[in-house]
Amino acid sequence: MIVREQSRFRLCWDTIILALALLSCVLIPYQLAFVHKTSAVSNGLLFAISLMFLADIGLNFFTTFRRAGSEIRDPTEIRKHYLKGHFAIDLLANFPLGMLFWLAGDPQVAGFSIVLWVRLLTLLRMVRFFVILRRWESLSWTHPGYLRVFKYLGVILIFTHCIACLWFAVAYVDGFPQDSWVVSAGIESADPVSQYVRSLYWTITTMTTVGYGDISPGRTVEYLLGILIMLMGASLYAFVIGGVASLLSNLQAAKNSYREHIESVETYLRARRVPHHLSTQVHDYFEYLWDRHKGLNEPHLLRDLPDSLRLEIILHLARDVLERVPLFRHCSPPLRNALLSALEPATYAPGNFLAREGEVGRSIVFVIRGEVEIVTGEETIVHGVMGPGDYFGYLSLALKERRSGSVRARDYCETLVLEQDSYEALSADYPEFLEALKAVSAERSEQASELLLAGVVL
Amino acid sequence: MEITVRDEGDTKVVMLNGKLDTNTTPAAEGEINALLDAGASKLLINFEQLSYISSSGLRLLLALAKRMKGFGGDLKVCALNEMATEVFEVSGFGSILNVFASEADALAAS
C-alpha cells in the first residue's frame, strides 16, 4: 500500500494532524502552568490525540516523498527516508509515556504531576507542523507565500503562548512568593483563564518592546527570565514580523513590477507629448491585460519548458479557445497541437485596428473574444461584424493581394494570429489543415461572398 | 487575356486564357454579361487555360452566380488549377458555385 503525498486523503489527514499539532502545543503547556494536574477527561483527550499521531507515524512509512522534483514511490526507499528523517522525533513526541506514568500512580515533581512534565515532549509535534507545510508548498495549487505567512504566524503564536505559560509557572513552582510578579499583580487566587490572560499580556508587551511596566519581575529568577524573553522574544518577533511584511510585499511583487512598467511607459508618452486620449488608451490597454492575464507574457513564460510540457499547458490554457473556434473541431489532435503551438496571441483595445486597408495580408487572424467590424472608405462604411470563432486574412494571404478593407476592434478583443510562414508549414505538413479551413469556410460562405461582392478582400 | 465562347448544346462554354486580374476582369465581365443579356441561361466557364485569378476574378464569378440565380440560370465552372481550387474551397465559394474537374464532367452534369 502506498499513499501519494499529494492525494486528497493525505491532504485531509495532514490538515487534521496540523490542527492537532497546534492544539497539543496550546493545551499541554497551559495544563502544566495553569491547571497543574491531570484529569480523566484531559488524559482521555490527549491520549486520543496521541493515537492519531501514532497512526500518522504508521502512515508516514507508506507516504511517497519528493526528491529532486521526482516523487519516490518505492516502499523500501520510503521507509529508509522516514527512518533516517523524522521518525525518532515523531516517536519521542508521540510515545504515550504520560499514560504509562499515569498508570504507575502519577508521582509529583516540583509540584507538578510528572505526567504533565513528560507531556512537554509533545511540543516536538511542531516538527510535523513544519513538515506538512513544506509538503503543501510543493503542491501546485497552493501559494507558497501565504503558507510561509501561516508558518510565521504559527511559530510566533506558539512561542508566545509557551513563554506566557513559563512566565506563570516560574512563580507557581516556588509557591507564589510575596515578591513574585503574580502576587504583585494580585492574581495568585484568580481563575486560570485570568491568570493566563495576564501572563500572555506581559509576554506580548515585553516581546513587542511596548513594556507598560504595570507587570514587572520581582525576583532574580524572574528578572533573568525577563532578560531572556526580551532578548529572544524581541528578536524573534522582529524576525517574524519582518518576514511576514516582506512576504506580504512579495505577494504583490508581480503587480508592483507591472505598475512600474506601466508608469515607465506613461512617463515616456508624456515626455514625447503623446495626446492625452492616446495615453489613456495605452493605460486602459495595460489595465485590461492585467485583469485578463495578470500582465504575464504567456509565450515568454512558457519558452523554457520542454515542448511536450509546454503543449500540455497550452492545451489547458486554450481549452475554451478549442470550444470557441470552430476550426479546431475539424482538426485532428496532431494538427490541433501543431496549430496551437503556431498561433500567437494578440490583444486589441476598442478602436484599435487589427488589419488596415492597403497593407499586404501576411497572416490569418482568429477572433477569440470580443467583436471586430469590417470597415472601408475612411472607416465610415461598416460591412459586417465578426465575433468569437470567426477569422479573416486568408484571401489576401492566398492571393498575395493588399487588403481592401480594415478590421477594427469594437471592444477589447483577443485574437490568435497565424503568420504566413506558419500557415505554409502547416499546409505542407498537414494536408487536412486546408480541409478543416474548407469545412469552416463552408459554414460562413454567405458572409464571405457578400464581403467580396462589396469589394472587400481581407 | 483571351476569351472564346462556343456552344455545347444549349450551354455557352466560355474559355478564359491568361490572367483574370484587376486589369482583365472588366473585359471578361462585359463579354459574359453580354451573353446573359442575349438570353443565355446556361453558362460554363472553363479555367483550363487560366494561369491566375485575382480577387476581382473571384468577385466576377460571385456576381455572375448571384445574377444567374436571380433568373434561374445555371452557372458552372470547371478545370480550375490547383491554386484556384484551393482559394475557391478555402474561401467557402465552392459551396456557392458548381465546380467540376473537367469540361466533360460539367457538360455531362447538365
Image (cartoon, rainbow, N blue to C red):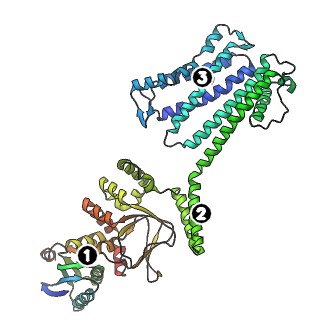
Give coordinates of residue A22: x percent, y percent: 63, 29
Category of crowding for the residue at label 3, using alpha-carbon neighbours closer than 10 angstroms: few (below 14), some (14–19), many (at least 20): some
Category of crowding for the residue at label 1, using alpha-carbon neighbours closer than 10 angstroms: few (below 14), some (14–19), many (at least 20): some
- Label 3 chain ID: A
Task: Please name the residue that numbered disc 2 is placed on.
Answer: A263
Element type where label 3 sits in the image: helix
**Along the line of sight, the residue nearer the viewer: A180 or A280:** A180
- Label 2 chain ID: A
| Quadrant showing the C terminus of chain A | bottom left
**Along the line of sight, the residue nearer the viewer: B2 or B101:** B2
- Label 1 and label 2 in one chain: no
Tell me if label 1 and label 3 are in contact, CB under 8 Å.
Answer: no
Amino acid on which disc 1 is placed: Leu
Give coordinates of residue A412: x percent, y percent: 51, 66
Q: Residue at x 33, y 65 (%)?
A: A440
C-alpha separation, residue under disc 3 versus residue under disc 2? 55 Å
Task: Say left or right for A247 vs A441.
Answer: right
Mark number, residue A49: 3
Residue A430 appears anywhere in the view: no
Amino acid on which disc 2 is placed: Glu
Mark number, residue A142: none
Q: Nearer the viewer, mark 3 or mark 2?
A: 2
Give coordinates of residue A91: x percent, y percent: 54, 19
- Residue A13, placed above or below residue A382: above
Element type where label 1 sits in the image: loop
Task: Say left or right for A251 vs A369.
Answer: right
